[in-house]
Amino acid sequence: MATAAVRDALQAEDLPEIDAIVSVETVTIDAGDRLRPVDMIWASALGELMLREGQRTPIDICRSADGTRWEIAGGGGHRLAGAQLVGIEHLKA
């Protein structure tokens, strides 16, 4: 749960509520530094699955340091790569 200061900062930037699920263009999301590399075979399989059945689990994102893009903040690197491989233009985040 966010503190009041964090919530106020987010609202000042007209961002959605914390814990909100939004649709974000995949071209605006950077994978960032990862603890483990993306397995492109697994990412491709996830992308194909998302094409057939939709995205079940949103990715975790945060604003980039310069505020112009999004970055993966935890889980979602394989889903992002998979979506990009199969041409999915928006992800739930």
Image (cartoon, rainbow, N blue to C red):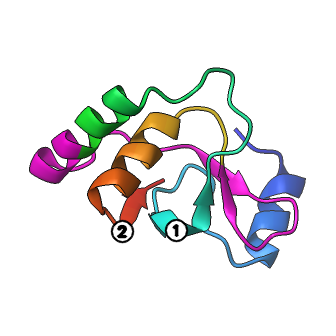
Q: Position of residue 54 (x, y in %)?
A: 19, 50
The range drawn in magenta is: 48-71
Q: Position of residue 90 (x, y in %)?
A: 38, 66
The amino acid at mark 2 is Glu
Q: Is residue 77 left or right of residue 79?
A: right
Q: Is residue 80 left or right of residue 19?
A: left
- Quadrant of residue 40 in the image? top left
Secondary structure, mark 1, is: helix
Q: Nearer the viewer, residue 23 or 3?
A: 23
Residue situated furthest left in the rendering: 52
Q: Position of residue 22 (x, y in %)?
A: 46, 63
Residue at (83% x, 65% y) in the render: 8
Residue 29 shows in the view: yes
Q: Nearer the viewer, residue 44 or 54?
A: 44
**Could you tell me if the residues under marks 1 and 2 are in contact, i.e. CB atoms within 8 Å?**
yes
Residue at (62% x, 21% y) in the render: 36
Q: Is residue 46 left or right of residue 39?
A: left
Residue at (12% x, 46% y) in the render: 53
Q: Is residue 63 magenta?
A: yes
The amino acid at mark 1 is Val
Relative height, residue 19 to residue 27 (above, below):
above
- Quadrant of residue 74 in the image? top right
Q: Which residue is mark 1?
A: 27
Q: Which residue is mark 2?
A: 89
Q: Nearer the viewer, residue 62 or 25?
A: 25
Q: Is residue 69 magenta?
A: yes
Residue situated furthest top in the rendering: 36
